[in-house]
Amino acid sequence: MAKKDKDYVLKQVKDRNVRFIRLWFTDVLGFLKSFAISPAELELAFEEGMGFDGSSIEGFARIEESDMVAKPDPATFTILPWRASENMNVARMFCDILNPDGTPYEGDPRYALKRNLKKAADMGFQLYVGPELEFFYFKDSSPKPQILDHGGYFDLTPLDVASDLRKDTILALEAMGIQVEYSHHEVAPSQHEIDLRYTDALAMADAAMTYRLTVKEIAMKHGVYATFMPKPIFGQNGSGMHVHQSLFKGSENAFFDSNDKYYLSETGKSYIAGLLKHSKEIASVVAQWVNSYKRLVPGYEAPVYISWARRNRSALIRVPMYKPGKANATRMEFRCPDPACNPYLAFAVMLAAGLKGIEEKYQLSNPIEEDIFEMSAAERESKGIDSLPGSLGEAIAFTESSDLVREALGDHIFEKFLMNKKIEWDNHRIQVTNFELEKYLPIL
């Protein structure tokens, strides 16, 4: 495969008749932002970056320091398949956001992830991740979701719009160089999952952002609506983003130890222990919306209990069983994130928690293989099993007092993120819901 550098991009733009290049980046909440440039501006964009007004971006600069520069990363160049035509093509590149003097901007989520990956690299590690992003297809975006099917987990439903939707989405992702492992119907009606093949964390964060837009774009072409809202239907499973992750040293998996009864190295155990210990602190980043905590409740397969296991899917962290000859597949699966988070920040805080465990040599507790959902509160307490925050408000409080999250995100993102989340929580708290009116108005 040709190296995607500046010269490669310039040649592709000319050879494939690319008329517009979209420059992509995210705000602190993970919303994708974009502006387009023409091929005539491309050389300048690579050399100096393209200026834009950062004050218009949620959580970016204050008004008095609003000038920002978006510098495209040529390694992320790809043609957008849903915008392709015989006459012209549209391409995209992810950008690093810089200050006018060319230094990295502290409020750029991509830079926050890069800083944490640099710390891992200084320790000799490279982070690989493989997220499983779930989502729903509905007939439209109205407040009363209308499902497309009544299928369940791995069901092969009769030929309907969802079958072509998943197929076309996978073809579009693969056309952009994003490898898909498999796809299937999920547990809830009209819920689906397309899993991306693991790769390095920065490329995967870019891929996750691309994935979310691609799912929505293909759905629109079919006249339906796709959503990554964590819990859109009461009484049904919500959508998660289980994140498989492992550290490598060169070509060797640093989590694997053939002599350990769990086939986990001390590095792997301490990394897992770090995520367990700091899971409350990072919860507001990996499950960042009020609605995220409607998913994180017992009884719907979503993990709320802070423990690890190999077979037990009620645990927060699962370590898939080792298969002989598959040492490089040794990994851990963190199960509380949802697909509506900012993947750059989510990967950053997960890595920070794991590295903290390695640095401090945290000891991993014994796995809990019993169904934790079936345990009483007293049984959980006797086994030392704690719970994740029960609401965004609780999660914010844990994050606000976390030195680990502040260091991982940097002061600017940390403070802007929390400010946004507090406003969201306050807006939620003052609402009078239909549930309250229906339950209390007739009796109070």
Image (spheres, helix red, strand yellow):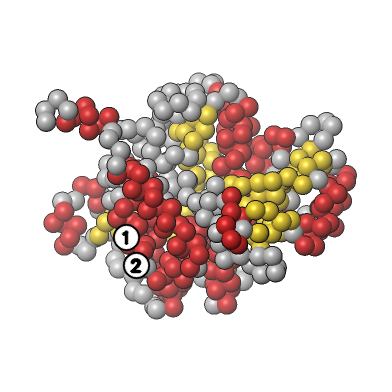
Q: Looking at the picture, does residue 414 appear above or below residue 433? A: below
At mark 2, the secondary structure is loop
Residue 417: image location, x then y, percent? 45, 57
Can you identify the residue that label 1 sits on? 397
Pointers 2 and 1 in contact (C-beta within 8 Å): yes
Q: Which residue sits at x=66%, y=49%?
A: 24
Residue 357: image location, x then y, percent? 40, 73
- The picture quadrant where one finds residue 121 is bottom right
The quarter of the picture where the N terminus appears is bottom right
At mark 1, the secondary structure is helix
Residue 104, visible in the rendered structure: yes
Give the residue furthest to the front: 64
Residue 202: image location, x then y, percent? 60, 59
Q: Which residue sits at x=82%, y=51%?
A: 41
Q: Looking at the picture, does residue 123 appear above or below residue 239? A: below
Residue 77: image location, x then y, percent? 74, 51
10 Å crowding of disc 2: few (<14), some (14-19), many (20+)? few
Q: Looking at the picture, does residue 138 appear above or below residue 52? A: above
Residue 401's disc number: 2
Q: Which residue sits at x=51%, y=70%?
A: 254
Camera-side residue of 188 and 111? 111
State how far apart marks 2 and 1 are (Cα).
7 Å
- The picture quadrant where one finds residue 84 is top right
10 Å crowding of disc 1: few (<14), some (14-19), many (20+)? some
Give the residue furthest to the left: 443
Q: Which residue sits at x=40%, y=52%?
A: 421
Name the side, left or right, on which 39 lies relative to 58: right
Residue 222's disc number: none
Q: Looking at the picture, does residue 366 appear above or below residue 166? A: below
The quarter of the picture where the C terminus appears is top left
Amino acid type of the residue that numbered disc 1 sits on in the rendered structure: Ala
